[in-house]
Image (cartoon, rainbow, N blue to C red):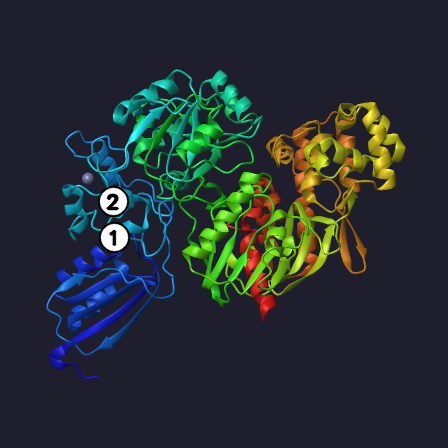
């Protein structure tokens, strides 16, 4: 191509997270510094650029664009075309274009950047102590976006008119706040108020903040409107206050997350590795579960019996200001009632949290959608999500190839929904257990929100195979497009393969509490060989009965009873020396035995999650639970690492399928208990037996790739030991990192399975 006098023009199209991150001013600065002319514009797909000038400068521009992009920008694709110059005389930032397919990434909310933080604590700055300070590198995004493209009139900041100073920053391409959509200052932006539970204003502005801090010091329960919803906060050292919060929420034992002032305070509470420090202080600022230090200065009631603490750093100026006013960590738990979604509106908060919180620190920037704190931990040296929300949602998981647009409605517990557009799967923020009216409404809201935001018209809806899940029923009511049922554990496997961009088959060790099996029984201890297009159930746990179904989930002692009853028959009812039997009243034992005898209301299951429950009960650790996974967690925490032997691992082959026999394991547990062996030994022998069983199946199946997925792989010991042993045997281990191994990752799996089914 011959260009006049070594000059040329480039048309560049960039897709990815390139809006709301200071991308256009960066392009402007780069282009003008290289003496190039042209323009840059946001459209619904991303950013379009035309630059012209010296060819050498254009090549440099092309090289430096991805290399020097703003820190929060993510470039998924960059396409460019060389054209003849047409004589642009200057470089300009043009107004956003609204037409076209909406594939630009909506950014997650971003924790306060160091520059903004410095301003907030600089007495000479005009934003000194201003809780809503932000810039193009930080601040609210997903929680304030009403529609695309991301411009101020399309956010909940549209009700605030910028003052001349903010206006000046917003229009100055060399300013950090150039086109920072939520730009605000004390003169023109949102402000704080402190309310009593009647909604009466007690204080405003900085006085509201200082009074709120004083209330925390006095042991009051404070509801704080934050970024994606309300927190309930209380002094983490104050046992009485935490107990009051637990009673009112109600939340008996489930650990509370903590917010600490900074890394220094975090170090007093937990053992921090360099990775943990980086992750805590990252722009995503998740709650990170970290090993608690002995004598950590927090009340036992924060996380009873738990060797970990979930801690996060302040992620908005409001949180920074509040935490610096006090010198102790606070409990910062979602502002909701148990099983309900987090509160986002101050009026609603008065109604729903009025009987919990004693004071309300609120502001007048509307929260467009709820976004909980994300929860993560570091396993095998890598951050991994247990709950995916703030900081991560709604960034997509990228597939290796494009698929049709599919809506997946997730499972029942820890629900998320997912929507595919091209090779991107947008996974919603954590919605929660669809157990309450409020949670189901939130589920419907999020679906509507995603369809509107991405203007997608799904060609199919994927749902769980379970006929009675509310998510399944919702799908049935929207059958204007084909419905594709997806087996629960198949979705777990497909989810793990998809996020690891693995195409071939893998052995999926899909272990969890509950999932509807293709034979109508409750699965949960499955070894599935396959990929998104299908699977073969190559092995599973020996089935047993759950007397009372859901009741057995709440009472691990019932599952223990069922296993003993199967092993020892009627004798089991008199085994008073065993903790689960002793804890069940004699009259109830008779009823349970009858139920098991007749198979009444006692569904059959292969759930490893329930086996964990039963062993936890048999080891005298936990007979009843107040939250999902409690018994299994307590058993994990008891693990004695010095014990390396295991209960017998016995498989039986039935029609070419391996059946892992739990009976020798349970017999071993009973024997150990009777010999007075420590629970740590019982826990270790049990964990080791499970690891060994996985190795044996993997060796028998012989597939190189092994995926560990399902809620049981929130167990760190099980995950780490299994992964290590598999690798020693030469297997390639696939773990989750972008989506949780629990049911929060199901919607992603449903999407990819459904896409295969459509072909
Ligand atoms: Zn900033
Ligand atoms: Zn202003
Ligand atoms: Fe599951």
Q: Nearer the viewer, residue 102 or 426?
A: 102
Q: Which residue is mark 1?
A: 22
Residue 578 vertical placement versus 286 (above, below): above
**Residue 135 - label:** 2
On screen, residue 154 versus residue 450, left or right, reads left
Q: Position of residue 427 (x, y in %)?
A: 48, 53
On screen, residue 548 versus residue 308, left or right, reads right
Q: Position of residue 41 (x, y in %)?
A: 24, 62
Label 1 beta carbon less than 8 Å to ligand 1: no
**Please, what secondary structure does the residue beneath circle 2 have?**
loop
Residue 734 vertical placement versus 204 (above, below): below
Residue 125 seen anywhere in this rendered image of the structure? yes
Q: Nearer the viewer, residue 458 or 531?
A: 458
**Residue 726 - label:** none
Label 2 beta carbon less than 8 Å to ligand 1: yes
Q: Position of residue 610 (x, y in %)?
A: 70, 40
Q: Quadrant of the N terminus?
A: bottom left
Taking the spot 42% from the left edge, 58% from the top edge, the residue there is 454
Q: Nearer the viewer, residue 60 or 51?
A: 51
How packed is label 1: few (under 14 Cα within 10 Å), some, or many (20 or more)? Answer: many
- Quadrant position of residue 390: top left
The reply to whether the C-beta atoms of the residues labelled 2 and 1 are less than 8 Å apart is: yes
Number of marks present in the image shown:
2
How packed is label 2: few (under 14 Cα within 10 Å), some, or many (20 or more)? Answer: many
Residue 431 seen anywhere in this rendered image of the structure? no
Q: Position of residue 627 (x, y in %)?
A: 61, 33
- Quadrant position of residue 330: top left
**Please, what secondary structure does the residue beneath circle 1 have?**
loop
The residue furthest right is 570
Taking the spot 78% from the left edge, 32% from the top edge, the residue there is 670
The Cα–Cα distance between marks 2 and 1, rounded to whole angstroms, is: 9 Å
């Amino acid at each position: 191509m011959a260009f006049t006098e070594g000059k040329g023009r480039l048309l560049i199209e960039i897709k990815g997270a390139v809006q709301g991150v200071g991308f256009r001013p960066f392009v402007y600065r780069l282009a003008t510094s290289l003496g190039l002319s042209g323009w840059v514009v946001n459209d619904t797909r991303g950013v379009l650029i035309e630059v012209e000038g010296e060819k050498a400068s254009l090549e440099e521009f092309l090289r430096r664009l991805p290399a020097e992009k703003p820190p929060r920008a993510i470039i998924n694709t960059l396409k460019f075309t060389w054209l003849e110059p047409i004589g642009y005389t200057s470089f300009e930032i043009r107004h956003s274009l609204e037409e076209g397919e909406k594939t630009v990434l909506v950014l997650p909310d971003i924790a306060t950047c160091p520059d903004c933080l410095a301003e907030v604590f600089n007495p000479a700055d005009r934003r000194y102590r201003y809780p809503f300070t932000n810039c193009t590198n930080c601040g609210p995004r997903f929680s304030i976006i009403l529609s695309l493209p991301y411009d101020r009139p399309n956010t909940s900041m549209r009700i605030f008119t910028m003052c001349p100073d903010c206006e000046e920053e917003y229009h100055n391409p060399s300013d950090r706040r150039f086109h920072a959509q939520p730009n605000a200052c004390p003169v023109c932006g949102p402000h704080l108020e402190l309310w009593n539970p009647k909604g009466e204003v007690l204080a405003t502005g900085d006085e509201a903040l200082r009074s709120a801090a004083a209330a925390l010091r006095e042991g009051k329960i404070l509801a704080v409107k934050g970024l994606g919803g309300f927190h309930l906060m209380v002094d983490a050292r104050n046992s009485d206050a935490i107990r009051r919060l637990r009673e009112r929420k109600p939340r008996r034992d489930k650990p509370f997350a903590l917010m600490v002032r900074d890394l220094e305070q975090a170090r007093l509470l937990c053992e921090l590795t360099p990775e943990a420090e980086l992750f805590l202080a990252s722009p995503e600022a998740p709650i990170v579960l970290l090993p608690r230090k002995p004598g950590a200065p927090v009340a036992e009631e924060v996380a009873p019996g738990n060797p970990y603490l979930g801690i996060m750093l302040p992620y908005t100026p409001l949180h920074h200001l509040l935490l610096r006013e006090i010198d102790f960590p606070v409990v910062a738990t979602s502002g909701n009632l148990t099983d309900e979604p987090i509160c986002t509106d101050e009026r609603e908060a008065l109604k729903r949290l009025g009987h919990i919180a004693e004071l309300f620190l609120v502001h007048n920037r509307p929260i467009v959608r709820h976004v909980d704190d994300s929860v993560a931990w570091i396993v095998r040296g890598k951050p991994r999500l247990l709950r995916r929300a703030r900081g991560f949602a709604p960034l997509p998981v990228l597939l290796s190839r494009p698929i049709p647009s599919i809506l997946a409605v997730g499972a029942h517990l820890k629900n998320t929904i997912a929507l595919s557009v091209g090779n991107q799967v947008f996974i919603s923020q954590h919605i929660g257990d669809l157990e309450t009216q409020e949670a189901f409404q939130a589920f419907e809201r999020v679906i509507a929100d995603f369809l509107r935001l991405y203007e997608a018209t799904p060609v199919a809806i994927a749902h769980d195979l379970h006929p009675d899940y509310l998510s399944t029923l919702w799908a049935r009511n929207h059958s204007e497009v084909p419905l594709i049922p997806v087996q629960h554990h198949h979705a777990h496997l497909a989810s793990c393969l998809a996020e690891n961009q693995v195409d071939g088959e893998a052995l999926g060790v899909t272990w969890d509490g509950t999932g509807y099996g293709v034979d109508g029984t409750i699965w949960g201890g499955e070894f599935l060989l396959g990929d998104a297009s299908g699977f073969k159930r190559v092995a599973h746990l020996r089935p047993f009965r759950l007397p009372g179904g859901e009741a057995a989930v709440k009472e691990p002692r019932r599952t223990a009873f069922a296993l003993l009853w199967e092993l020892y028959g009627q004798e089991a009812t008199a085994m008073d020396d065993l903790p689960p039997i002793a804890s069940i009243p004699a009259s109830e034992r008779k009823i349970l035995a009858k139920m098991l005898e007749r198979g009444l209301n006692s569904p059959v299951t292969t759930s490893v999650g329930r086996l964990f429950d039963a062993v936890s009960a048999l080891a005298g650790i936990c007979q009843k639970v107040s939250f999902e996974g409690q018994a299994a967690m307590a058993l994990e925490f008891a693990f004695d690492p010095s014990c390396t032997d295991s209960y017998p691992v016995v498989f039986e082959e039935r029609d070419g399928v391996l059946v892992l026999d739990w009976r020798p394991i349970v017999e071993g547990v009973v024997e150990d208990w009777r010999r007075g062996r420590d629970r740590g030994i019982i826990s270790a022998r049990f964990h080791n037996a499970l690891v060994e069983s996985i190795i044996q199946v993997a060796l028998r199946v012989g597939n190189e790739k092994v995926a560990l997925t399902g809620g049981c792989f929130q167990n760190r010991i099980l995950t780490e030991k299994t992964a290590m042993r598999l690798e020693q045997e030469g297997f390639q281990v696939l773990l989750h990192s972008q989506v949780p191994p629990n049911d929060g990752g199901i919607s992603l799996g449903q999407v990819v399975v459904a896409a295969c089914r459509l072909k």
